[in-house]
Image (cartoon, rainbow, N blue to C red):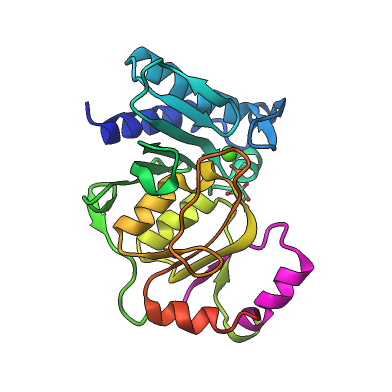
Amino acid sequence: MEVIEILREASNRIYENVKDLAGTESAAGDFGIGAGGDISRNIDIIAEKTVLDYLREINFECVVLGEECGRVELSNNPKGFIIMDAIDGSANAVRGVPFFCSSLAFAVENKLSSVTDGVITNLANGEMYWASKDRGSFFNNKQIKVHSKDPIYKIIGINTSGASADLMQRLYPIFEKYNHIRHFGANALEMALFARGLIDIFIDLRNKIRIQDIAAGYLIVKESGGILLDADLKPLDADLSYETRISFVAAANQEILDEIMSQIDK
Ligand code: IPD
Ligand code: CA
């Protein structure tokens, strides 16, 4: 079975197991602080267990790097890493806001740039985004590309959750000039919408995103033709450690990248 099929099946199983849970009291159950540093909610735990159970069932030889469960070695002879954010957008999921997803990626080395497969599933409706290295990105069964033409409305995604006053001040010229700024609350799914051409540029300069939040989106964005850069506008890369925190910009083309980034105060 190809790795991408394994990730897709694991994502489908998450969807089946959590689809009726979002917004219920049971979703919120508190399991203490997870490996990623946030409170693990019952819905996070159920989703992670679904993946771990499945990987054990098929004897997939890997090391899992889960946002809640931490590093789980499923083999002494691993083929690589499964980077798992079983629920991205946990706050939305717990409240029942229909914008949350699962993000599963496979990397052969301890680096974001070694991700070979990624799957993001919208857990509000089961829609799936996936990519394998050099094979393109797909939404359900259709290949997707970032937006190429001049859009009717320029949609700018900016993650401002917990942003510092200094960052908000630097970003202010964009807020002043543009009318369609969006922030939905699940970074991985926002990257997937970007890859599908629904958002023209997506900016997260908070230095808060974990490797689990970004690994699948990294490949899906790149395979859909997006430009993906770090805060210094260099090609994005990072190691897979639990301490790593990332800032990034995903842009549909150089033009919009230059236009928007030139507004940000240095
Ligand atoms: C969160 C979401 C959110 C972002 C946070 C992440 P989680 O992931 O991606 O959009 O603003 O920084 O932690 O905690 O729901 O998996
Ligand atoms: Ca999560």
Relative image position of residue 13 (x, y in whole percent) = 40, 27
At x 48%, y 73%, the residue is 155
Residue 127, visible in the rendered structure: no
Residue 162 screen position, x and y as percent: 73, 57
On screen, residue 59 above or below 185:
above
Horizontal and vertical percent for residue 221? Answer: 37, 57
Q: In the image shown, does 140 or 26 lie closer to the viewer?
A: 140
Q: Residue at x 63, y 26 (%)?
A: 42
Q: Is residue 69 at all visible to an observer of this figure? A: yes
Q: Residue at x 60, y 38 (%)?
A: 242
Residue nearest the observer in this picture, 108 or 47: 108
Residue 206 in picture, x, y percent from top left? 65, 60
Q: Is residue 26 magenta?
A: no
Residue drawn at 47 percent across, 51 percent down: 189
The answer to whether residue 174 is magenta is yes
Q: On the image, which quarter does residue 115 sit in? A: top left
Tell me the quarter of the image containing the C terminus.
bottom right
Q: Which residues are magenta?
A: 152-175
Does residue 263 sit above or below 57 in this rendering? below
Q: How many marks do you count on the picture?
A: 0
In this rendering, position of residue 129 left or right of residue 46: left
Q: Quadrant of residue 11?
A: top left
The reply, left or right, for residue 148 in relation to residue 48 is: left
Residue 152 sits above or below residue 38 on the image: below
Quarter of the image that includes the N terminus = top left
| Left or right of residue 75: residue 85 | right
